[in-house]
Amino acid sequence: MSSATERRSLLKAVYEQARDCRRCALHQSRTTVVFGSGNANAELMFIGEAPGANEDRMGLPFVGQAGKLLDKLLAEIGLNRQDVFIANTLKCRPPDNRDPHPNEIEACQDYLRRQVELIEPSVICSLGNFATKLLRADSTGISRLHGREELRLIGSRAVRLYPLYHPAAALYTPTTLETLRADFRRIPELLARGTPVQPEPLKEIPEAELEDSEPEEPPTIALEPLPQLGLF
């Protein structure tokens, strides 16, 4: 396992790659890449959908009214931005804040996977409908899933995925705000459970062993795979 200093250095390297990214057409319209911000060793990570106009201009996630509400909700549970890491599924703003396109998600997914693997959070809060569906690789909406944690694999990292309403949805809807606030109150409890058991890393088999081994018969029974992101 890498040290905190090594992981922070590796995360900076991923940022350097992302800020000059031209993997999809969004680089033609962006002002700046919004890589994410916060504690590189955070136990708690928030993942939203994509940068908006303010984020695209300033290069930081959640800097508008929704970001101010997020700061307030964090303060209510004794946390602040320096304690967490905040990112989006896309690092560049889609024109007119439209939904991300599949090719854009595919082009950007490695950055998010690397962020999760290097930061090593124990809890990830998906903010809103789009991020939740994306991270679960499932079409179930946020209204059914909010406040219900589950163990998930994101890349090679096992986390407690905790879907929440997006703060923007709660700005002008008091009932949604109260629901979001109630769900936030459970975050300290989830963090107190500690890091989920991690999957065993795949071991490389020496080439000599591969040459000497007999080919295995294909299995006759299909086993259920571990729950995992379809993206990564």
Image (spheres, rainbow, N blue to C red):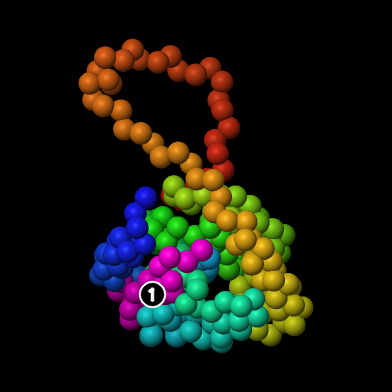
Residue 31 appearing in the image: yes
Residue 217 in the image: state x and y as whole percent: 43, 14
Image point (47%, 50%), residue name: 157
Viewer-side residue, 24 vs 160: 160
Q: Which secondary structure dominates the residues rendered in magenta? A: loop
Q: Is residue 181 above or below residue 186?
A: below
Viewer-side residue, 17 vs 49: 17
Residue 44 in the image: state x and y as whole percent: 53, 65
Residue 163 image-quadrant placement? bottom right
Which amino acid type is shown beneath numbered disc 1? Val
Crowding at mark 1 (Cα within 10 Å: few <14, some 14-19, many 20+): many
Image point (29%, 71%), residue name: 19
Label 1 element class: loop
Image point (44%, 74%), residue name: 38
- Magenta residue span: 27-43
176 is within the stretch colored magenta: no
The number of callouts visible is 1
Q: In this view, does 57 lie to the left or right of 62?
A: left
Residue 23 appearing in the image: no
Extreme-left residue of the structure: 208
39 is within the stretch colored magenta: yes
Q: Is residue 178 left or right of residue 104?
A: right
Image point (41%, 40%), residue name: 201
Q: In this view, does 231 lie above or below 105?
A: above
Residue 103 in the image: state x and y as whole percent: 40, 58
Q: Is residue 16 left or right of residue 2?
A: left
Residue to which mark 1 is pinned: 34
Residue 228 in the image: state x and y as whole percent: 52, 45
